[in-house]
Image (tube, grey):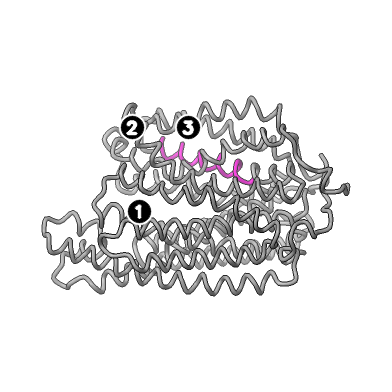
């Protein structure tokens, strides 16, 4: 470890060029979350998947990604973040080609699973490398702000890119767009990105790999099913089983010197606070997305492509919010700006609560305000947590942040989605067909105009209740953020801090 004045640690043109290259895998990983929205009808015609297989084609990517983040973060610190990034890029490219030319539903599911494995290597590696390349506080904050905005924008861009490709090519083209970017990454990374790894990592704890997956996957699966299908005992048991395995996993990490999750990460309470606040931010982001996408298509009656294009509008605000927040935090400190981000997002939910059955601009305004506040929080919280972690554990720290984000997003969809669904079902008349009482999608497929109108009003009523809940939660979280970060380095402006030690590889 060496200590140098912050003014001598500023990144130059090479580091910023490398950073642009590192944005490629981030964009593609986030785009792959939504890239199938338009492709699934063509896939259904070509591969004839069953209803269960169709669900797994969608979900296996996110499950593999979430389940392996902790493992890959720890592995990157041990074998080298650049090395793991290149392995992941090669796997992602290979899986993309396999998915594009899949000849059966089973083959496509397997390829999507491999894409998730590749994505799990890419996300913590890129953030860990950003932490290592940008040792100046201000520059690192700017880079992570851009990183957070790119990740949020990639999810929205994925569905639009899918629609554009399918206008001209076959369904496999939505996967082949990954390949040139991964080839470019494999060529440029060795020349631009230095290698960073933990010089004394200890043994790799193999038993912790299945334990970490057993803790994450059942909980994420159960929560997603709650959001999609409602409460059931079986889904509750999935969540409880995951929590039980998680308890065993945590006990193991606390008792081993070569733990997958180093106890050093939690010596500064800022890191634990960062994971918690990031999870709440993801809760708010995914909870609002659950309603806005359905509103555009099922309430306003937009086609999928039109809805995807309108959903890009809030991304403009996101592109402005992250760098602005970083600049303000440099003067006022991260803590106050993080709390302000939650207040802004709370105001966005307040705007959503005013949505009616024909309120496109109110909806988009609310979504833009929510996104601006949440990206502000995510950018600053990520920077704050990574800065508090030992440099040699940067990928592990990034993987924990991202795993918390996956949990938060799943809980947001489950909780707010359940609130909206409960109100919807309560408002629907007993005489309505059972399927229409369950989901808005089934109701709007009906030829009964009165039923469709009632269903849309019921959905909006549920949206309003969920928005009020989101407003209250985020205002409370703003106060919690102030309490958690009081007396920490996050409260001090960057220029007032002591120079930070950094591992030099």
Quickly name the residue at label 2.
Answer: 166
In the foreground, 232 or 198: 198
In the foreground, 461 or 401: 461
Say whether residue 162 is magenta.
no
Q: Is residue 469 visible?
A: yes
**Mark 1 closeness class: few <14, some 14–19, many ≥20 residues within 10 Å:** some
For label 3, the SS is helix
In the foreground, 280 or 300: 300
The span picked out in magenta is 107-124
Q: CB of mark 2 within 8 Å of CB of mark 3?
A: no
- The image quadrant of residue 214 is bottom right
* Distance between mark 1 and mark 3 Cα atoms: 26 Å
Earlier along the polypeptide chain: callout 1 or callout 3? 3
Quickly name the residue at label 3.
Answer: 96
- Residue found at x 69% / y 62%: 332
For label 1, the SS is helix
* Distance between mark 2 and mark 3 Cα atoms: 16 Å
Quickly name the residue at label 1.
Answer: 293
């Amino acid at each position: 470890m060496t200590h140098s004045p912050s003014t001598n640690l500023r990144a130059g043109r090479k580091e910023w060029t490398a950073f642009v290259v590192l944005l490629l895998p981030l964009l593609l990983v986030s785009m792959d979350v939504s890239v199938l929205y338009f492709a699934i009808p063509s896939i259904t015609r070509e591969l004839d998947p069953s209803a269960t297989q169709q669900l797994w084609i969608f979900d296996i990517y996110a499950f593999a990604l979430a389940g392996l983040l902790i493992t890959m973060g720890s592995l990157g610190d041990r074998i080298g973040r650049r090395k793991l990034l290149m392995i992941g890029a090669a796997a992602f490219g290979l899986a993309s080609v396999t998915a594009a030319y899949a000849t059966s539903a089973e083959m496509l599911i397997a390829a999507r699973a491999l894409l998730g494995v590749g994505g799990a290597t890419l996300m913590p590696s890129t953030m860990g490398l950003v932490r290592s390349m940008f040792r100046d506080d201000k520059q690192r904050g700017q880079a992570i702000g851009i990183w957070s905005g790119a990740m949020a924008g990639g999810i929205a861009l994925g569905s639009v890119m899918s629609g554009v490709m399918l206008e001209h090519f076959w369904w496999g083209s939505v996967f082949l767009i990954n390949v040139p970017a991964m080839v470019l990454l494999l060529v440029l990374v060795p020349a631009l990105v230095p290698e960073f790894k933990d010089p004394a990592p200890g043994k790799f704890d193999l038993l912790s790999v299945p334990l970490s997956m057993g803790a994450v996957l059942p909980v994420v699966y159960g929560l997603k099913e709650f959001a999609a299908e409602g409460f059931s005992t079986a889904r509750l048991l999935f969540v409880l089983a995951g929590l039980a395995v998680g308890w065993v996993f945590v006990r193991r990490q606390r008792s081993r010197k070569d733990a997958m999750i180093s106890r050093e990460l939690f010596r500064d309470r800022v890191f634990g606070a960062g994971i918690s606040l990031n999870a709440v931010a993801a809760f708010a982001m995914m909870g609002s997305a659950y309603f806005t996408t359905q509103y555009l298509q099922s309430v306003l009656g937009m086609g999928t492509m039109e809805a995807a294009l309108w959903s890009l509008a809030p991304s403009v605000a996101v592109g402005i919010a992250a760098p602005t927040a970083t600049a303000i935090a440099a003067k006022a400190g991260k803590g106050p700006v993080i709390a302000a981000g939650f207040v802004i997002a709370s105001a966005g939910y307040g705007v959503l609560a005013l949505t009616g059955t024909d309120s496109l601009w109110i909806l988009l305004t609310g979504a833009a305000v929510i996104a601006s506040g949440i990206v502000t929080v995510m950018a600053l919280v990520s920077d704050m947590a990574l800065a508090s972690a030992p440099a040699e554990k940067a990928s592990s720290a990034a993987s924990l942040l991202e795993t918390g984000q996956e949990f938060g997003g799943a809980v947001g969809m489950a909780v707010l989605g359940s609130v909206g669904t409960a109100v919807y079902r309560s408002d629907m008349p007993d005489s309505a067909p059972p399927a229409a009482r369950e989901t808005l999608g089934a109701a709007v497929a009906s030829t009964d105009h009165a039923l469709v109108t009632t269903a849309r009003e019921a959905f909006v009523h549920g949206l309003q209740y969920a928005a009020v809940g989101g407003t209250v939660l985020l205002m409370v979280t703003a106060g919690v953020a102030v309490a958690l970060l009081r007396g920490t380095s996050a409260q001090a402006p960057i220029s007032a801090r002591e120079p930070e030690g950094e591992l030099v590889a």
